[in-house]
Amino acid sequence: MVSLIHRAVRPRVLLAAGWLSLLLCTAVAPATAQSADGNTRHGWTARLAADAILAPDAGPAFWAYSNRHGTVDASSSNALFRAFAERTFQLPGTVDAAVGGELLGRSSAEPGVFAHQLYGRFRSRGIELQAGLWEDEPSGLLHPSLSIGSLGRSRNAQPVPKIALQLPSYTPVPGTGDVLSVRGYFAHGWLGTDRYVRNALLQDKALYFRIFRPEQRAQLHVGLLMHTIWGGTHPTIGDLPDGPMTFLRVMGGRAGDVDAPEIEQDGSLGASAAGYDLGLSFSLSGADVMLTRYFHHTDRPSLFFRNPWDGIWGVRVDRPEGGLVETVLWNHLRTTRQNAKFSEGEERGEDTYYNNSLYRSGWTFEGRVLGSPLLLPNDRGPGVSNNIVIAHHIGLGGRLPGKVDYRLRATYSRNYGAQSVCADDACTQLEDRRTSRTDQYSIGGELSRTVNALTFRAGFSADSGALYADRVSVLVGFSWKASRGAIF
């Protein structure tokens, strides 16, 4: 019994120790970088872009709209116009500040003009505080643009309005001789009214340790992540707990308080997902290699590796000197067991990843999955309708002769649907939508060439299989960028 208690509190102890390390690093982290004359440099940047995505009636292919921060309408051809600007300046002391915004106009089956980004950011001694809307880098150790997309947070959905405090770069922990470094992220967000539980809140936490100094041949990366949807107004229960004490309980991964609804699973408060993100990076024959393994969890039993094969494997090789092949990677995603007790007759998909019995919109925002795009949103109502997936993915990037940059993504997946899926928009009934194996192939490629301040782009995407309609889409576009000074 004692050993079981020790195992149960270990993740909390690690998180507490990590946040303490983060606070220590805040106090001793070096000040912001300075120019040769000793003055902190600031400036501005502006960018204009226009893209056209031509697609059949079924809409663009998978990699034409996935992991693009929700900017591309997945149901039709698109014409996109974007105007971005950011200004940085210095406040008294060591505080740097920035304000930025981006206006997005889209002509498609769902047209509109809206503020895609709008934020303010402060940085001092390596710590950043940011508020508003902005395009986050995805959570985890996977490549941000070429990978399959994190099971935690990827680039797939629109930016969530939030406030975030982070230590974005590894910072040595005092007293460890640079052998142990830490970086972290904590955010509080608002998911809006267009959900089954209106005005639900989002809490994101990530904490990473790097073991061994960066100049050494190899480094070990250990990450702990937790994402929780909580609070809001349920259509039948009413207002859910969302006060300061509830915030602290969610922050600590604690069980629900006395006011929590009885139907919450396992005594937990809100809809939570967590992950162990492990990585090994090293240099080999002039290349940088990263081996990664992400373990996905949705409840306490899974924290003890009941689902050892669920998650994402990754191998990435980067060549710092560039050339024809600069980056090549392979990802393997598996989300099949989901805590199913096979010995008791349960079938795979038991935990129905990204869905929740209370928060039935699940791990989605504005109709897009917040994590890996291979787990598909429900086309009949809230939540996710395809979350039992096995996939292999290859990403490739580099530079062709003539200074033409390219990137290529190719994905093969086997899909088995999901259980406990909303049957209609009101989600008055849940249905088991597990299916037999459905194979799918998706590919996407893009070329770009920069001449002075102009960048020209061309790309294609294609799908073949039984999950989506067979389709091909084409992208053409350009962007203009101007800047002055340094942007942090």
Image: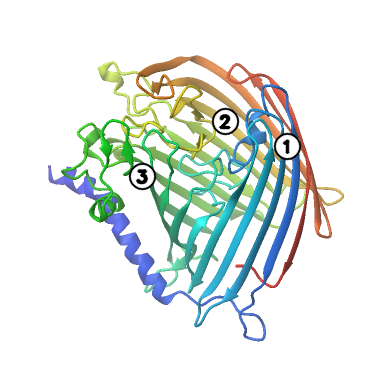
Question: Residue 335, position in %: x, y?
Answer: 44, 29
Question: Which disc is residue 445 wearing?
Answer: 1
- The outermost residue toward the left is 1
For disc 3, the marked residue is 228
Q: In this view, does 155 lie above or below 221?
A: above
Q: How many marks?
A: 3
* Between 240 and 171, the one nearer to me in the picture: 240
Q: Distance between the residues labelled 2 and 1?
A: 17 Å
The amino acid beneath tag 3 is Thr
Task: Find residue 56 and report its image quarter.
Answer: top right
Number of the front mark, 3 or 2: 3
Give the CA distance from mark 3 to mark 2.
28 Å
Classify residue 430 by image quadrant.
top left
Q: How crowded is mark 3: few (under 14 residues within 10 Å), some or many (20 or more)?
A: many
Q: In this view, does 401 lie to the left or right of 408?
A: right
Q: Quadrant of the C terminus?
A: bottom right
